[in-house]
Image (cartoon, grey):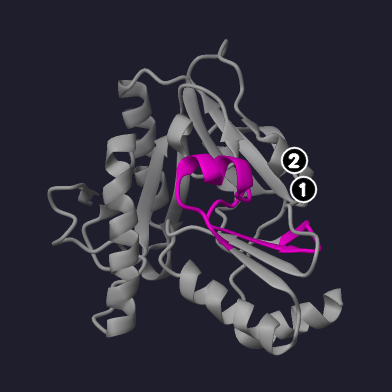
Amino acid sequence: MKIISIDKNNIEQEHICCAIGNDKVNQSRALTKKNWMKERFSDGLVFKRLDDRGKIFIEYMPIEKVWKPILGENYMVINCLWVSGKFKGKRISTELLNECINDAKKQKMDGIAVVSSTKVKPFLTDKKFYEYHGFEVVDSAPPYFELLVLKFNKNAKNPEFSKNAKQGTCDNKKGFTFIYSHQCPFMEEHVNLLSNICKNKKIPCEVIHLKDYKEAQTKGSPFGTLGIYYNGEFKTHELMPEKKFEKFIEELI
């Protein structure tokens, strides 16, 4: 099993798992993600994947510059750990997690933090996986987010969700608010689709594109890459297809 690191020296030649098709749409997605990554390497971003084609990677960075509403010092935060399809059940997730653990220890960090959920949710790694590897829940945010930590220094202060995340609200109190970042290459087109549905239905909506980690830490959802709010309250982080979102609207209004 060979794991490779994507950095500024090889990012143009290597794929980044999320969007690996050769069609124009996936090429555009990959470019969006790679541009975001290039600007984050100096902040300590690490992206490692199995040397194969598929969704088999881990991405993490120091908490001080993380694009999530998490506060703390000297922790590594896992942005995304994704192993899918034929690669499941082969301990690849554990190997990728160990890469993060080893890197954090080399940097003399106090531990690793990750956002999961009370119950299994799309696009969030099941917290049972992390608990199996020694992580413990140290904080929560509505309606279902949990912050888990694996401590190396038992005396270190726990990280926590920001005040905004714990409130589960946004400033706009009228209609939908979509808050997203280019950390995930699918978000912009997805948000455009959902916001157009709102506009066609004459439902007020606001789109907020997070441009830096400070915005993400103060305005972003605990999921980080996407937050969908209605009348100022957080509702979901889920990427929904058109018909599912229309049903979602019907249930809200």
Q: Where does the image place residue 157, in percent across and percent down from the top left?
A: 60, 17
Q: Who is closer to the viewer here, 11 or 31?
A: 31
The answer to whether 253 is drawn above or below residue 90 in the figure is below
Q: Is residue 241 left or right of residue 42?
A: right
User: Do the residues bearing badges 2 and 1 touch, measured as CB atoms within 8 Å?
Assistant: yes
* Mark 1 residue crowding within 10 angstroms, few (<14) / some (14–19) / many (20+): some
Q: Which residues are magenta?
A: 208-235
Question: What is the CA distance from the residue labelled 2 to the residue labelled 1?
Answer: 6 Å
Going by the numbered disc 2, the residue's amino acid type is: Lys
One can see residue 91 in this view? no
**Percent from the top left, x then y, of residue 207?**
60, 66
Please say if 164 is above or below 191: above
Whichever of labels 2 and 1 marks the residue nearer the N terminus, that label is: 1
Residue at x 50%, y 22% (from the top left corner): 73
Q: Which residue is painted at 19% across and 55% down in the image?
A: 11
Q: Which residue is mark 2?
A: 166
* Residue on which the image places disc 1: 142
